[in-house]
Image (spheres, grey):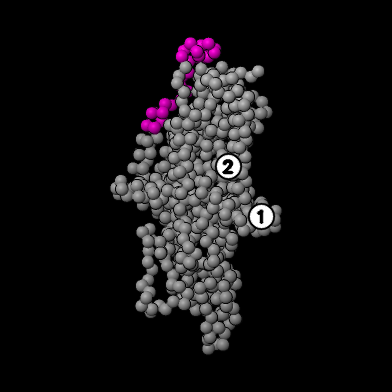
Amino acid sequence: MSRSRPGGRRPRTARSARWAAARLIVLAVQLLVLAAALYAFLSSDAYADKARSLVSSWQIFPGLAETARAALDAASLGAALAALIAAAPLFAIPLLLLSAVFGRWYCAALCPLGALQGAAASVKASAGGGRRFRKPATLARALAAIAVLGLAFAGAMAAASWLDPWSLFGRFVAYDLRPFVQMAFRADAHGFGLWTALPIAAAIGAILFLSVRSKSRWFCGVLCPVGSLLGALNRAAPLRFRIDPALCVSCGNCLPRCPAACIDERAKTIDAGRCISCAACVAACPTGAIYYGAARRPAAAHTVAQLGGAAPVEAAGMSRSAFLSVLGGGAAALALAALPGRKAASSLGARPDVTVPPGAVSVERFIATCTACGLCVSACPSSVLLPSLGELGARALLAPVLDFSVSYCQYECSSCMSVCPSGALMKMPLAKKKLVKIGTASLVREHCVVFTHKTKCGACAEHCPTAAVRMVDAPTGIPEPVFDSSICVGCGACHHICPVPGKAAISVAGMQVHQTALEPGADLHDDKFSGPSYGSEGFPF
């Protein structure tokens, strides 16, 4: 006959089976999320955009960093709250609220980089040696969080996102795995390059190596700013995984199952700041000492002694107050240092003719908000978006730019804006996007074969979606191209298709601040047209 747990609770076997089933559900969700992320970054079929939008909504870091930046820029508390509401992603705030109540389930189920680390760590742990409790790297976590906040406040989100798990995973799939998949299907591997792929592969390789060596989710417990935030919420969450020291017999069954290495067998505690709520330890506990829920009343000292245990003590490491002091003081100091330097930082940079995607509003805003996650690069049907290697300066390494030598921005497409998780590319209806002027074309007659070789061409006019370039009759009998910049949107179709070798006869240069083009066929002298109109952030509406 199986023993019943104290207080009339269910038998241990039934409880174990229930939590084993919960663990399987967590693993199934983890695999589904990983599969969805791989599909979103690697596929280009009709359903891929939906997958990319879903993946975009799961990311916490981009929205929270932009929210903090917008709130810091606000002149008053009311403006800061308004900025927070406006900038916060739809999914992030409810997720944080749920985490503050129900614990850190996000890391267990919705983080693909965490899943990869868990798999790598489990291989080593199962091979021999098992796992043991690792002291929390609290100072390293605080310093990593300070660095991320400082870079975000300084307008270098792409640099800050090297510590964002979703951005790291996205770059790895988009710039390391995707080119090989494209080559396997005999497609052009746009965006592949040694200096694009190597840094990301090195970062992911180092994370997985350290996870194997530590037999734990190393990045999650040491550097991840999202994990640090969710860990802080998990400490305060009323419902989370805990150990009842009155029932714990220090058998050690839970330790090999914990991917975060956060269970202290001797102290009979779980480090809530690192626990990822994976439910792996609960089913393994033979006495029911590990449970999910609110804190129980401390057991009497004689009850603990009867079970052969010791009085619980605090886990080793920096105290919560010390951690918050380091984090808060460091963040404030970096914010104060970063704000005056943002103007100077904006000069580190971008080439004056660089072209950024529609929805960016301006090159500087794009640099300050893009996390270089690679979603838009994967979503672009024409492959005109490529990771930058200096075109946007050091602050935005690998953030996407348009390369018209490869392709052009499709007039009927708005995929990049629909999948951007950070708000770096503002969402808008397709009709609005068609009027966004991201660059301007210029025609050099001395390079055009129509003028230099008296040869019929017209390729630029045939491919221009707004008829900004058109062919007109000339006295020579050969139609000549003329250009109207007022309806040009800078899509680069003319630039890409120009057959002149070397320097194209018609080329597109990006605009530092995007403008609004006239609608094709609009009358410049129409009294109804009063020029571009701009929203609060300089975006045309």
Q: Position of residue 227 (x, y in %)?
A: 49, 37
Q: Amino acid at mark 2?
A: Pro
Q: Which mark is residue 112?
A: 2
Q: Secondary structure at mark 1?
A: helix
* Residue 141 appears in the figure: no
Please report the residue visible at 57 percent of the width from the left and 45 percent of the height from the top: 169
Whether residue 187 is in magenta: the answer is no
Classify mark 1: residues with Cα within 10 Å, few (<14), some (14-19) or many (20+).
Answer: some
Q: Quadrant of the C terminus?
A: bottom left
Q: Is residue 183 above or below residue 21?
A: below
Q: Position of residue 125 (x, y in %)?
A: 63, 28
Q: Position of residue 401 (x, y in %)?
A: 51, 58
Classify mark 2: residues with Cα within 10 Å, few (<14), some (14-19) or many (20+).
Answer: many
Could you say which quadrant of the image residue 364 lies in? bottom left
Q: Which mark is residue 182?
A: 1
Magenta stretch?
A: 300-325
Please report the residue visible at 57 percent of the width from the left and 75 percent of the height from the top: 462
